[in-house]
């Protein structure tokens, strides 16, 4: 048996999870889920409650329907571990927590998310690109409506910030309510510039 074959044998047959852990690239949804588990071990129903309470379906790619599927996938990859415990109703339930490898992968993913700008697709770009197909009056009315919608979203995020502060949210998590305001304000500035440049 050659050395190469022997090494492959050891890695895939003796320890088949080796390559899974080292080559596994976390999705954004998995990172969001593992972020919850980094706070404390949780059972799926508790995760569902946190996702709903924190409205994570709106600002992450994590959905209620995907939780169980992702947990099984992460467990198979050796990034989370499951143990059974009895509930107050004396029923067995599954409690999930991060493994040391899962914690390492999550930290690496967080670093990547913080350092790499995301390419964002804006629906309005399709509209402006093809705005010659409708009248200038309709373009102006639509853009004024778009700007109004942006302002309403800003109000919503500022109310969210107030709520987060009132509920004792850690300062580093306030960014989910403050960063969108900067983006939306910049978008309003762009709308004003676009309307001025197109219509004077």
Image: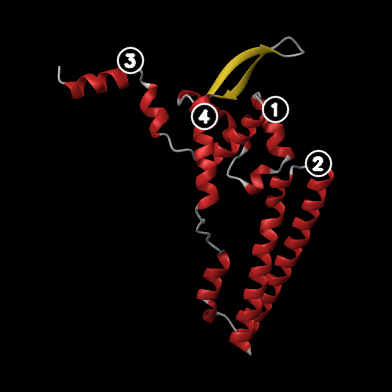
In front: label 2 or label 1: 2
Q: In which quarter of the image is residue 190?
A: bottom right
Q: Earlier in the sequence, mark 3 or mark 4?
A: 3
Residue denoted by label 4: 102
Please report contact status of discs 2 and 1: CB closer than 8 Å, yes or no. no
Q: Do tag 1 and tag 3 residues touch (Cβ < 8 Å)? A: no
Assign the C terminus to one quadrant of the image.
bottom right
Please tell me which of labels 2 and 1 falls first in the chain.
1
- Residue tagged 2: 168
Residue at label 1? 46
* Distance in Å between CA atoms under marks 4 and 2: 28 Å
Left or right side of 22 for 187: right
Q: In this view, does 15 lie to the left or right of 124?
A: left
Q: Find out whether the residues at labels 1 and 4 contact each other: C-beta distance under 8 Å.
A: no
Q: In this view, does 42 lie above or below 89?
A: below
> Which quadrant of the view contains residue 17?
top left
Graded by Cα atoms within 10 Å as few (under 14), some (14 to 19) or many (20 or more), the crowding at tag 3 reads: few
Q: Where is residue 37 in the image (x, y as percent from the top left)?
A: 62, 30
């Amino acid at each position: 048996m050659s050395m190469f074959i022997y090494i492959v044998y050891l890695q895939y047959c003796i320890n088949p999870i080796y390559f899974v852990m080292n080559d596994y690239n976390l999705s954004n949804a998995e990172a969001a889920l593992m972020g919850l588990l980094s706070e404390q071990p949780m059972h799926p129903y508790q995760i569902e409650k946190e996702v709903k309470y924190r409205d994570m379906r709106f600002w992450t790619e994590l959905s209620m329907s995907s939780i169980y599927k992702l947990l099984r996938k992460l467990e198979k990859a050796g990034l989370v571990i499951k143990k059974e415990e009895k509930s107050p109703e004396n029923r067995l339930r599954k409690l999930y927590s991060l493994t040391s490898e899962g914690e390492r992968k999550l930290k690496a993913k967080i670093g990547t998310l913080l350092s790499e700008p995301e390419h964002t697709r804006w629906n309005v770009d399709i509209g402006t690109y093809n705005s010659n197909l409708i009248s200038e009056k309709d373009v102006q009315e639509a853009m004024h409506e778009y700007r109004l919608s942006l302002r309403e979203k800003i109000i919503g995020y500022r109310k969210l910030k107030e709520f987060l502060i009132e509920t004792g949210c850690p300062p580093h998590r306030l960014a989910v309510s403050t960063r969108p305001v900067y983006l939306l304000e910049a978008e309003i500035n762009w709308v004003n510039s676009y309307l001025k440049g197109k219509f004077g």
